[in-house]
Image: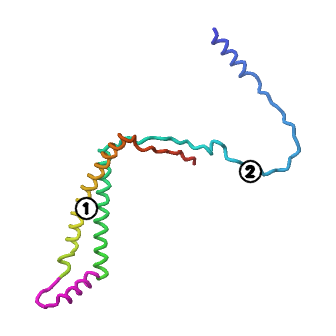
Amino acid sequence: MEETGQHQALEEETLKPPVTKTAVQTPAAEPSVVAQQPNDETKKRRKIRRKLSYIEPWSVTKMAFVISVALMIVLVVAVVVFWFVLQITGVWQALNDSIVNVLSDGSTSFDLNNYVGLARITGLTLIVSAFNVVFSTALATIGAHLYNLAAGLMGGVEVTFEERNR
């Protein structure tokens, strides 16, 4: 029964004609320039404090491996490009000629490309980079475990995040 009373009251309110008010016109005042101060809402930024107390070692291992492989690819490409730049500019030939002049006994022929050829330099770079991938991945994983041990003793690192207003 109470619902029908509320329903009727709502119908009566919606059926009433809207009330209109007429505004009294006042003469236009001189416009004034008022410096607007920023709202309190724009001044306040939400800050959240969190504590980093554990790092998942497997996640660190995966990320370290991916980053190390990416750096390996970059290093190999950079070494190959650098080798070609030295080849095109004639540095290898100039070094070869200088070494031949120093070792000029006439009976042996010396070719610097036997020692610093593209295949040899690229292979050496790949070997060093592969060791770097293994070493970096292992070091990052050990670092994550050491952080977890230290965070267990000391409580971790407190980080404050702040929300940006755009």
Q: Secondary structure at mark 2?
A: loop
Q: Kindly report the secondary structure that dominates the magenta region of the rendered protein.
A: helix
Most extreme residue toward the left, as rendered? 107
Q: What's the colour scheme?
A: rainbow
Work out whether 113 lies above or below 38.
below
**Could you say which is closer to the camera, residue 165 or residue 101?**
101
Q: Quadrant of residue 78?
A: bottom left
> Looking at the image, which residue is at 69% across and 15% down?
8
Which residue position is annotated with label 2? Answer: 35
CA distance separating discs 1 and 2: 61 Å
Residue 120, image x, y percentages: 19, 71
Residue 15, how many percent across, how many down? Answer: 73, 21
- Could you classify mark 2 by the number of other residues whose Cα lies within 10 Å: few (under 14), some (14-19), or many (20 or more)? few
17 or 129: nearer the viewer: 129
Q: Which residue is rendered at x = 20% and y = 88% of the image?
A: 102
The region drawn magenta spans: 91-110
Residue drawn at 25 percent across, 56 percent down: 135
Q: Residue at x 21, y 75 (%)?
A: 117
Q: In the shown orientation, is residue 82 left or right of residue 109? A: right
Q: Which residue is mark 1?
A: 129
